[in-house]
Image (spheres, grey):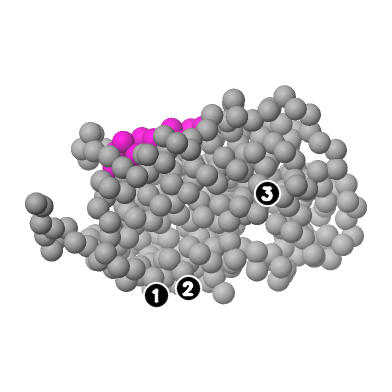
Amino acid sequence: MTTMTERDALRDALGLLRDREQVAERLLESSAKHSFDPDKELDWDAPVEDGKWFWPPELLSLYDTPLWRKMSEEQRMDLARHEAASLASLGIWFEIILMQLLVRHIYDKSLTSNHVRYALTEIADECRHSMMFARMIKKGGAPTYRVPRVYHNLARVLKTVSTTPGSFAATLLGEEILDWMQRLTFPDERVQTIVRGVTRIHVVEEARHVRYAREELRRQMVSAPRWERELTRISCGEAARVFATCFVNPQVYENVGLDRREAVAQVKASGHRREVMQSGAGRLTEFLDDIGVMNGVSRRLWKSSGLLA
């Protein structure tokens, strides 16, 4: 009979942490049962459907603003098409970063462990997701929207120097807000069938990724040195600010015939948009608060991002 040592029995405000290998084993079992090949699962040859949105209107950045009320239905639907492409582009950028962070995480770990096997499984998932998002952008006929060059290059630094808890905190930031929006999108019959299919696959597979990241971040916030926990709080808050800034590329507004400055100003002033973004981040910020990531400077940074009330 194996006796759990005090060192192994890690605990935080949410309770006793589960064994890392057991968590990974369950996630591997789930992956074997519920993984998808988007190339085969989705009908990419089906035509774009007239009168259907590429993103739910209530989740669009300009919804219920003075500009929105002036826009024609055709222009609103075009905005949805471009915002969906912007979000998919952001998702690809983020998932490429995530894959590199995961490879760094497992570099020194046991190559035969369930924990490493699951990380490699998740990397394979993210490869498929990135290709799936790229096909969705191309299907919609909108351009690819890159993040501003300053953040693109800052991510190079992040991929090189990020600590383990910082990596998993950033992972959750990128996954959970989009996941919240996608859970509203895939059952919405107003939305293009191909977009609903893409979001359904992403929601099912990302649920495992979120579980893996949450469990590991909890472990790191208990076991990591104090300096690393403090750095995680600051880097997570700054990442929230960057993520909120990059969520919709302002070029989207110009591409649908709107004044860029006016559109950006109205998005910033929109109570509806603020509520959407804070609702999307709500489950994550509650979790981060529970495990001690939202202390001090981190909370102020999250508030300045607009993702926390």
2 or 3: mark nearer the eye: 3
Q: Quadrant of residue 114?
A: top left
Per the image, label 3 sits on a secondary structure element best described as loop
Q: Quadrant of residue 132?
A: top right
Q: Position of residue 178 (x, y in %)?
A: 57, 52
Instruction: Evaluate if marks 1 and 2 touch, with contact meaning CB atoms under 8 Å apart.
Output: yes
Residue to which mark 3 is pinned: 187
Q: Which quadrant is home to the C terminus?
A: bottom right
Count the marks: how many?
3
Give amino acid for label 2. Arg
Give amino acid for label 1. Gly
Q: What's the CA distance linking mark 1 and mark 3?
A: 39 Å
Find residue 296 and name its label.
Answer: 1
Give amino acid for label 3. Pro
Q: Who's the residue at 71% across and 71% down the image? A: 271
Q: Who's the residue at 53% across and 36% down the image? A: 129
In the rendered view, tell whether residue 285 sits above or below residue 102.
Answer: below
Sequence-earlier tag: 2 or 3: 3
Q: Is residue 212 left or right of residue 228?
A: right
Direction front: furthest residue: 1
Find residue 300 and name its label.
Answer: 2
Q: Is residue 73 visible?
A: yes
Q: Residue 117 lies in magenta, yes or no?
A: yes
Q: Residue 280 lies in magenta, yes or no?
A: no
In the rendered view, tell whether residue 14 sits above or below residue 261.
Answer: below
Q: Who's the residue at 60% across and 66% down the image? A: 279
- Magenta stretch, main secondary structure, is helix
Find residue 172 and name its label.
Answer: none
Q: Which residues are magenta?
A: 115-128
Instruction: Evaluate if marks 2 and 3 touch, with contact meaning CB atoms under 8 Å apart.
Output: no
